[in-house]
Amino acid sequence: MTKPATPETVPTTVGLPGAIAARAAGQPDAVALVCEGRKTTFDSLYQVSCRVANALLAAGLAPGARIGYLGRDSERLYELLIAAADVGVVLVPVNWRLTGSEIAYILGDSGCRLLFVDAADEGVAEQAVQQLDQRVELVRLDAGGVAGAGFAAWYAPYANQRPDAEGDRQRALLQMYTSGTTGNPKGVVIPQQSLFAVREVRDSSDMPWLEVPPEDRCLVLIPGFHIAGLAWAVQGLLDGVTTVVLPEYTPGAALEAMRTQGVTAVCGVPVMLLLVLAEPGVTPADFAGLRQVAYGGSPMPEQMLALCMSLYGCEFLQFYGMTETATPITFLPPADHTPGNPRLRSAGAPYAGSEIMILDKAGNALPPGEIGEVVVRGPAMMLEYFHNADATADTLIDGWLHTGDAGRLDADGYLYICDRIKDMIIVAGENVYPAEVENALVAHPAVREAAVVGAPDERWGERVHAFVAFHPGQSATPHELLMSLRDKLPSFKLPQQIDILDAVPRNASGKILRRRLREPFWQGRDRAVN
């Protein structure tokens, strides 16, 4: 095995391209990425990213220009990311599950000049481009094709040496679009520095659970068009370990990677981790090599967490953050993942360099135990919402980022997320946060997942309406579910109706699409509150 580069080999002042150059010099034959059996060494990653950077310059792209990536996760995504950092271009990863109109909105809003697209997504890409006034050149990520030159042919004529200037780490590198659970998505502009923030704090603080052994092989289940997936993979590149990339998450593909790729660390959202455990024939032996599971992106109900911890049989680490914070704001370390620990209901505590306040509607700081809006600041924050000064001003206020999450702090500074403020249900003047009711429903042994929304009620203003999906081969009546809640929730939080679904609708990041469930109740009304 090639000896990993030492910390001295990777100066903390360089950007992403400089860090990869140092890894290529110190451990050229070490495997950086594995995808569908293809192994990309640090040397290959460095040389290809240099060619891509020079190709971007030859295409006339100046610093600040936007390029898009519409495709499954692969080594190509990271070659483009490193190249973009080298020349100051901004990469816009696009969710390939979106419709042509949704993709057109992102391309138009960002002003993309180049779009790198998978063969499988070529049709929807052309459909999107035809809706635009601007010219967007398509580069197909595999060889040939009517969309234009294949990716390798596109960059092949250019030198495998870095451009002259090191990119500015404070300059924009990514434009990630929010999941769009309400209205059009916003383009979150993220500086390159944000990808280094947690690592640099880790190296100067006491966070041993974030240390990365040189023999690690990390499997990232979250797709790269989501900041958590891309940022977690980049940490592996910066640390000089191998990252296993799935082109597309399926429970079977994730399980197969854990069984065959020597995976030692996994990063995913709760529903992804749970679905792996539902695969036929799965046993704890499949996870014998795991040392850590990191999870975030949505709450993990306690019973689901207990099941995952039991079967995965390794340490668990929770993180809380959002696209706008680029990297996590809080961590719940493995030491807090003990049976019966009340902190398991929390999202953890802010790490060194990050701060959290809870504010009331007037902007006043609330004491521990009081619920209000969670506002944060830290070393990794968005620069702005692209071309949206009003939304930026509403979100970034005096250096604090207003998350839109409702939560509380305990006396030890641990954060407890109640829900999104805009998802809050008001029943006869009482606040009901859907996540609390959902967690209570999921505690029933038959319930796999649950979603709760507010529906109009002529007497109480709003009422709680629940949707549940069952584990395979299990079921319960709405009355049985309701009876199971009576000793867990006060009467005003109890669902007035429970509907059975095959699955709760979620977006590509695993977040519940409450808007889709809520909208039918409010159609024909002047406003979606009562």
Image: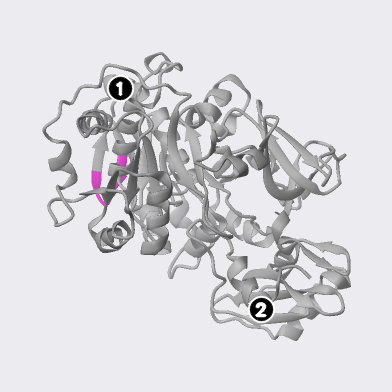
Instruction: State the predominant SS element of the stretch in magenta.
Output: strand
For this rendering, which residue is in front, 200 or 159?
Answer: 159
Task: Where is residue 86? Give x, y as percent.
Answer: 33, 26
Determine which of the numbered discs, if any, sits on residue 35 in the image.
none
Task: Classify residue 388 as left or right of residue 113.
Answer: right
**Residue behind mark 2:** 524
Residue at position x 37%, y 16% from top? 9
Q: Is residue 331 visible?
A: no
Magenta stretch: give its range.
33-38
- Left or right of 203? Residue 403 is right
Answer whether residue 511 is magenta in the image.
no
Judged from the image, the secondary structure of the residue bearing numbered disc 2 is loop
| Badge 1 amino acid | Ala
* Between 316 and 155, the one nearer to me in the picture: 155
Residue farthest to the top? 8
Circle 1 packing at 10 Å, graded few (<14), some (14-19), many (20+), is many
Question: Which residue is the site of mark 1?
Answer: 21
